[in-house]
Structures are given as structure tokens and as C-alpha cells.
Amino acid sequence: MKNQSEQLAQEKIEARKRLLAMPPEEAQKQVEKTLYPQYWELSLEDNIWEESIPTYYGETDT
């Protein structure tokens, strides 16, 4: 089994291959999305808010 650094190196190679296979404009957009957070997109369908604090947290029953 490969160690973590070898696995990461292989994943980087595969990612670069995918970028090089894309049309230049599309590849540039993907790179910019990674490098510049203002281009990041949030999919609300993939991010569901789960309440981690009970609704009545800190209130007492008096």
C-alpha cells in the first residue's frame, strides 16, 4: 500500500491530467474557483443545516 505522500502525489497527477484534458477556458475557471474564494459556489442542496444546540438551550423550567 502506498504511503500518504505517494497517494497525494498520484492524486495531484490525476487532477492535472483532468485539467489538461479540458478546454483551456473551462480549465482556467476551475483553477480560479480553487485559488480565489470569491468564485466558490455553494450548493444549498448539498449543505443542510443541522441544529447542534437544542432550541431551548440555557433556559430553565421555572
Image (cartoon, rainbow, N blue to C red):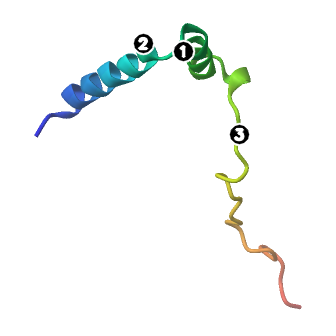
Q: How would you rate the neighbour count of disc 3 (Cα within 10 Å): few for under 14, some for 14-19, many for 20 or more? A: few
Q: CA distance from mark 1 to mark 2?
A: 7 Å
Tell me the kind of residue under disc 2. Answer: Leu
Image position, residue 8 (x, y; %): 29, 28
Q: How would you rate the neighbour count of disc 2 (Cα within 10 Å): few for under 14, some for 14-19, many for 20 or more? A: few
Image position, residue 16 (x, y; %): 38, 17
Relative depth, front residue between 31 and 8: 31
Residue 19's label in the rendered image is: none
Tell me the kind of residue under disc 1. Answer: Ala
Identify the image quadrant of residue 53: bottom right
- Of labels 2 and 3, earlier in sequence is 2
Residue 20's label in the rendered image is: 2
**Residue at the image point whose x is 55% and y is 8% from the top:** 24
**Residue at the image point whose x is 30% and y is 19% from the top:** 13
Furthest-top residue in this view: 24
Residue that numbered label 3 is attached to: 42
- Image side of residue 60 versus residue 26, left or right: right
Element class at badge 3: loop
Residue 27's label in the rendered image is: 1
Identify the image quadrant of residue 36: top right
Q: Are marks 1 and 2 in contact (CB under 8 Å)?
A: yes
